[in-house]
Image (cartoon, grey):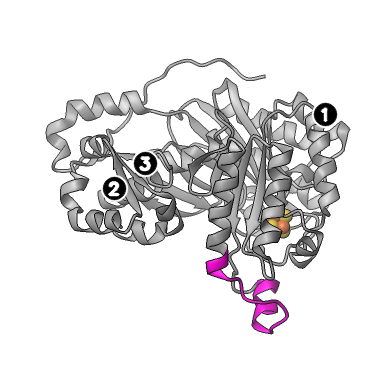
C-alpha cells in the first residue's frame, strides 16, 4: 500500500550554526545530508472504553458520533497541513492514544489515506497501532492487517487481576492472553507489551511472576514504565486518603533490576532506558524521538518536531481541537524555536536515553563541544559513581545510570 523510497535532499535554510560550527560549514552540510532521517507520523486517538485510575493522558470516553467528527477533523488537519515545505519521506506511522483500536477499520483507512495523499510513505513503513486487551475481534484484526498495520503496541500493564482492578483497567489478564493469541493468529509478528512496575501494593515476587508470564509469550518488544502518580487522578486521591499505599521507589528500582536480568536471560536487548526488544525489533517510530529525527503529530495534544530547531504542539482539549479545525483554524497552540543551547541539551539527554550512548566525536562535529573537556568534572564524578562509562568514542549510561538518568541528564541541561 505504500510508495517506494526516493532519496531526497532537504532544501531551505541550513541548520543553525554555532560560532564554532561556522568554520565547519562544509562538514556540517555533509553531515546534515548524510544524517537526514525519514520522518514519523503520529496520530492521536483520544478515546478509551473507560478511564484508568492513574491516567492523565488527553483522552476521554468513546462516543461514536464524536469519534466520527474527530476522524473527519484529523483528516482535514492532515490534508491542509503545510508546516514544513518539503517534508522528508515517512517510514513510520503510529496510532497512539487513548485506544486507537476502538476506531473502525473504515475510520483508520480514512486516516491512512490522508497520510498517503499528503506524505511520501515508504513501502517498508512501520505502522503501529496501540491496542488494549479485549478491544478487538479477529475480523477487526484482519482488516487492520489488510490496511498495512504491521505492529501492535499492547497495553498489558500487569498479569495480576487484582492489580488490573486497582488500576481501573477495563480488562482481565485472560483478556490479555486471548487478545495476544488473536494478534498472532491474525499474523501480527511484531508485538510490543507495555508493563507497569511500582504499583501500589505490588511485591517483588508479584512483579517477577509478571515478567515470567510476559517473557513466556515472547513479544518482540517490551516497554516498561514506573508508575507515576499525577495530581488530579483518582489514584492520587486514593493514595492521599490512604485507600492505597504510596508507591515504594526503592522497590521499583529492584523491579527494574529484576526486569533487566530476566530480559537478558530471555534474549532481549535493553536498547533504551525503558525499552527492550528481541534483536532487530527496536521501535523505529519511538527511536525518532530520541535521535532527533523529524516527526509530525496530528490530532489533539499531538506534538511535532521538524528535525532541526522547531517544536510545536496541538490543542490538548478534544472539543476545542475539533472546533478549531472545523472553523479552518490552526490547532497549533504552542510553537517554539530551539536555541542552540536547547538543541545541544536535547541531543544529550535524548541521545543518552539510548543505551548505545552518544558519539562524542559526532557531538563535537555538530555542536563544537568537546564533552570530555567541557564536562570533565561531572563526567569524572558520574564515572566514579558507576553511572556512566566510555566505550571508545561512545559516552553511555550504565545499568545503574539508567535508573538515575535524570540526575545525569541534569548536568548537561
Ligand atoms: S487505556 Fe491508556 S489512555 Fe486509556 S484511560 Fe487507560 S491509561 Fe489512559
State which mark lies toward you, 2 or 3: 3
Q: Is residue 193 above or below residue 158?
A: above
Q: Which residue is mark 1?
A: 185
Q: Which residue is mark 2?
A: 344
Identify the mark nearer the N-term, 3 or 1: 1
Q: How many marks?
A: 3
* Residue that extends furthest to the left in the rendered view of this protein: 23
Q: Is residue 375 left or right of residue 348?
A: left
Q: CA distance from mark 3 to mark 1?
A: 37 Å
| x and y, in percent, of residue 168 in the image | 77, 64
Residue beneath the point at 28% across and 27% down:
31
| Front position in the image: 154 or 30 | 154
Ligand 1: does it lie within 8 Å of the C-beta at label 3?
A: no
Q: Which residue is mark 3?
A: 357
Classify mark 2: residues with Cα within 10 Å, few (<14), some (14-19) or many (20+).
some
Q: Is residue 245 magenta?
A: yes
Check if mark 2's residue and mark 3's residue have beta carbons within 8 Å. Answer: no
At numbered mark 2, what does the secondary structure look like: helix, strand or loop?
A: helix
| Front position in the image: 328 or 11 | 11
Classify mark 3: residues with Cα within 10 Å, few (<14), some (14-19) or many (20+).
many
The picture quadrant for ligand 1 comes to bottom right
Range drawn in magenta? 233-251
Quarter of the image where the N terminus is located? top right
Amino acid at each position: 500500500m505504500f510508495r517506494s523510497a526516493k532519496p531526497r535532499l532537504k532544501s531551505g535554510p541550513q541548520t543553525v550554526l554555532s560560532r564554532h560550527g561556522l568554520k565547519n560549514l562544509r562538514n556540517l552540510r555533509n553531515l546534515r545530508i548524510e544524517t537526514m532521517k525519514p520522518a514519523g507520523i503520529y496520530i492521536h486517538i483520544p478515546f478509551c472504553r473507560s478511564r484508568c485510575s492513574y491516567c492523565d493522558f488527553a483522552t476521554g470516553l468513546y462516543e461514536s458520533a464524536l469519534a466520527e467528527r474527530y476522524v473527519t477533523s484529523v483528516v482535514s488537519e492532515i490534508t491542509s497541513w503545510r508546516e514544513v515545505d518539503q517534508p522528508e519521506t515517512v517510514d513510520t506511522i503510529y496510532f497512539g492514544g487513548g485506544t486507537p483500536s476502538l476506531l473502525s477499520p473504515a475510520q483508520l483507512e480514512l486516516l491512512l489515506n490522508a497520510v498517503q495523499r499528503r506524505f511520501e510513505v515508504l513501502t517498508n513503513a512501520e505502522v503501529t497501532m496501540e491496542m488494549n486487551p479485549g478491544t478487538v475481534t479477529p475480523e477487526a484484526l484482519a482488516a487492520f492487517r489488510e490496511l498495512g498495520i504491521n505492529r501492535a503496541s499492547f497495553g498489558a500493564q500487569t498479569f495480576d487481576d487484582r492489580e488490573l482492578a486497582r488500576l481501573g483497567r477495563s480488562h482481565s489478564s485472560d483478556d490479555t492472553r486471548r487478545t495476544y493469541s488473536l494478534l498472532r493468529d491474525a499474523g501480527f509478528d511484531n508485538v510490543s507489551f507495555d508493563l507497569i512496575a511500582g504499583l501500589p501494593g505490588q511485591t517483588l515476587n508479584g512483579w517477577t511472576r509478571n515478567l515470567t508470564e510476559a517473557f513466556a509469550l515472547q513479544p518482540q518488544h517490551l516497554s516498561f514504565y514506573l508508575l507515576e502518580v499525577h495530581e488530579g487522578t483518582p489514584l492520587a486521591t486514593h493514595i492521599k486518603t490512604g485507600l492505597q499505599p504510596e508507591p515504594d521507589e526503592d522497590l521499583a528500582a529492584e523491579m527494574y533490576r529484576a526486569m533487566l536480568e530476566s530480559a537478558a536471560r530471555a534474549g532481549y536487548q535493553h536498547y533504551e532506558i525503558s525499552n527492550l526488544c528481541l534483536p532487530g525489533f527496536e521501535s523505529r517510530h519511538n527511536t525518532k524521538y530520541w535521535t532527533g529525527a523529524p516527526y509530525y503529530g496530528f490530532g489533539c495534544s499531538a506534538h511535532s518536531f521538524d528535525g532541526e530547531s522547531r517544536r510545536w504542539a496541538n490543542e490538548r482539549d478534544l472539543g476545542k481541537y475539533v472546533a478549531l479545525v472545523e472553523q479552518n483554524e490552526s490547532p497549533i497552540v504552542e510553537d517554539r524555536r530551539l536555541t542552540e543551547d536547547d538543541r545541544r541539551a536535547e541531543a544529550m539527554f535524548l541521545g543518552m536515553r539510548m543505551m548505545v550512548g552518544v558519539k562524542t566525536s559526532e557531538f563535537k562535529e555538530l555542536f563544537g563541544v568537546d564533552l570530555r573537556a567541557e564536562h570533565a568534572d561531572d563526567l569524572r564524578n558520574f564515572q566514579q559513581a558507576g553511572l556512566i562509562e566510555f566505550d571508545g568514542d561512545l559516552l553511555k549510561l550504565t545499568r545503574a545510570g539508567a535508573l538515575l538518568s535524570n540526575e545525569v541528564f541534569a548536568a548537561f541541561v
